[in-house]
Image (spheres, rainbow, N blue to C red):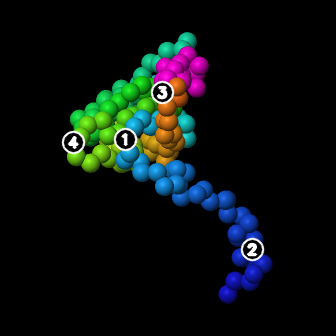
Amino acid sequence: MDSPDISAQIDAMEPPRRPDTIRLEGWDYRSAGPYFVTMTVHARQPLFGLLRDGAITHSEAGRIATRCWNELPRHFPQVSLDEWVVMPDHFHAIVWIGTSGMGNPPSLGTLVGAFKSASTRSIRLATGIPDLRLWQRGYHDRIVRDIEELERIRRYIRNNPRAGR
């Protein structure tokens, strides 16, 4: 039987829990429009290449991630890709959902999950490391609300290698 003092001590040692979601409450992430997404490599390891003098030299893993991203519209015809960049330890992209009238568009979470799954599977096969942990859990997203914001995010993505971020 636990004493109240021990339970309080154990509770105090547990790290605070993150909310289950940081998504915009009430928003349908299948809604047509552009979304800015950032995904981070597990433990920020530079698995996708090297950044030198503002230019990225992609590793085999970086080239595979690029190929997987480019293939998404083939699997999801309601999606189109905008500006994006594979950095050594993270990935930024603008993706448009609902760009065609063909069927129901995927949710942003479905799209990100498909990309992470396909890239992880392909990189594990290429490296021969079957238990490689490629991505950090979750992703950051932003619903792009207007053309000015879209242009600002496009510039940010294009300049990301030069800024080394």
The amino acid sitting under disc 2 is: Ala
State the residue position of label 3.
147
State the count of labels: 4
Circle nearer the N terminus (1, 4): 1
- Report how far apart the C-alphas of labels 2 and 1 lie in the structure: 47 Å
Q: Position of residue 55 (x, y in %)?
A: 49, 15
Image: magenta residue range: 150-165
Assess disc 4: are there few (<14), some (14-19) or many (≥20) residues with their C-alpha within 10 Å of its C-alpha.
few
Q: Nearer the viewer, mark 4 or mark 2?
A: 4
Q: Secondary structure at mark 1?
A: loop
Q: 67 and 129: which one is in front?
A: 67
Q: Is residue 138 left or right of residue 16?
A: left
- Report how far apart the C-alphas of labels 3 and 2 lie in the structure: 51 Å
Assess disc 1: are there few (<14), some (14-19) or many (≥20) residues with their C-alpha within 10 Å of its C-alpha.
some
- Report how far apart the C-alphas of labels 1 and 4 lie in the structure: 13 Å
Q: Nearer the viewer, mark 3 or mark 4?
A: 3
